[in-house]
Image (cartoon, coloured by chain):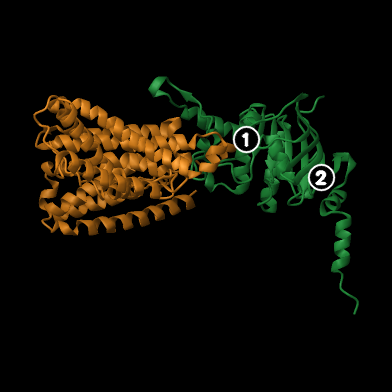
Amino acid sequence: MTADSLAPPRRLGNRLFGRPELGAVVGAVAVFVFFSVAADSFLRPASLGTVLYAASTIGIMAVPVALLMIGGEFDLSAGVLVTSSALVSSMFSYQMTANVWVGVGVSLLVTLAIGFFNGIMLSRTKLPSFIITLGTFLMLTGLNLGFTKLIDGTVSTKSIADMEGFASARALFASHLTIGDVGLQVTILWWIVLVAVATWVLLRTRAGNWIFASGGGPDAARAVGVPVTRTKTGLYMAVAFCAWISGQHLLFSFDVVQSGEGIGNEFLYIIAAVIGGCLMTGGYGSAIGSAVGAFIFGMTSKGIVYAEWNPDWFKFFLGAMLLLATLLNAWVRKRAEAAK
Amino acid sequence: MTALVKLTGVSKAYGHVRALEDVSLEVHAGEITCVLGDNGAGKSTLIKIIAGLHQHDRGSYEIEGAPVRHASPREALDHGIATVYQDLAVVPLMPVWRNFFLGSEPRKGRGPFKRLDVAMMRETTRTALRDMGIDLRDVDQPIGTLSGGQRQCVAIARAVHFGAKVLILDEPTAALGVRQSGVVLKYVAAARDAGLGVVLITHNPHHAHLVGDRFVLLRRGTMTGSYTRDGITVDELTREMAGGTDLEALAHELRRPAP
């Protein structure tokens, strides 16, 4: 008999307890039950589409933000970066060319460059990412407003709806399809794909191993040859890439962009990631958890409307949920470790 | 038989501070060379030279008879010299098997679908640990849930698995209790039996004498003694370690004054 088989196999219960997203799933079920009882129209199929749409707009960004948090860093510029990305494609298309796809491409490059800037600043200055991305956040907020007023004279961009390529770009970023009674936005599809890809990368690739290690023990990781700074820069660029997707959705679901939008959304992404089980200190969390967190956000923001309450209460609910989820996560983790 | 690692008259100075002066030691395959000394004796400078973090100023450093001068830890690693530091070995929240392969992950598939060979990683970790005699319930548990001794052992097993010829252990028993220390020493002996040359840095003469084949004593950067196992008893080693004549002087000083 080998030494290994002497030990009892790990029970399924323990395995389940060890998952980072467990607390979020319990929370999601609770919120779902709560609004099912409190609001009659909440359970209607049409409502599901609305809730999922609200969840997806946050969820698309919560995925890379969760990965970044697992890698041990924050990005406070993520919210306004979405707006910046939308502004760049809109204004570049309007001013420089006749085809919106050129603007969309330029926007991708510019957005990725900003993500790269965040990563390089972090590795070069060794300052906390909180400070660096706070700086980027403020600078982008200023640039968004400044450039838009300088070029268009007002706080919003000119309509690009009559330009070439608008229809095809809208189909990719902002179309919606109807299945039965349920209207589904294409962002839901983007969201699901991103969660699936991120989960695969995190759990089944070398890059994923490096992300966990960069957040969980950067010195130990460096000592065994993990390129920690390159990993973190890559994560900032992943945030930028998803900000580009969100930005294009913002632009093409209407045809103009308000330059002041996006401020404060960075916290919603972080909240979704934390509710989903990401540890503030890095090294622990999951992409699926961030999706559950975003779903809780979607249910709460729309559930309040369906329950015909004053939406002013929404932020209170969100804050209470964040505290509860964090406490629950801490409790679950302690139990999981004690069970071993 | 040529030594795996041979230092002859090695010296190192940081600016005007002489950290190491004329130190010689040998490490043979299947043997344990213990480096003993108090804090500030130059132990860490010595391992940093062997591990490639620093270069020596004078003397010679040979690996299997060929003189070397490592520019980086990576280079030393390529020569088969692995170092297990006291606290710098693992990422606590990650599972044992991920830690085991961190930085050298085996992959399968091609192009963008290149992925970790998870089944192989788990199985290899399990067998590598079992070969070292480590009984782990579950290689999926976070390595932080293991005891300090077990963590050291995983790091040792990992060095052995990745083909190290020489294993440098930096105070592996320093932060451990008596029982845990015993466990770690068992695995150090297992690494020796696997044919590795081991450099054991310690300030505990009892631990050193339990497993050591050669002993090098350092004090304030100089070598105060070099013995083989049959050349010294544990009492002599302890006395040497404690500073010999220094200790007598101290005992004299501490004596109660006559009333």
Counting residues from the N terminus, which is met first, the one under dot 2 or under dot 1? Answer: 1
Q: Residue at x 20, y 48 (%)?
A: A299
Q: From the viewer's side, name the closer residue of A93 and A249.
A: A93
Report whether A174 appears left or right of B257. Answer: left
| Number of numbered discs | 2
Find residue A313 and report its horizontal and vertical position in percent.
18, 59
> Viewer-proximal residue, A161 or A328?
A161
Left or right relative to B221: residue B244: right
Chain A's colour is: orange
Which amino acid type is marked by label 2? Thr
B208 versus B256 height, above or below = above
The spot of residue A278 in percent (x, y) is 38, 47
Identify which residue is drawn at 86% across, 73% down. B256
Q: Is residue A325 visible?
A: yes
- Residue picked out by circle 2: B222
Residue drawn at x 25%, y 34% as measured from the top left: A245
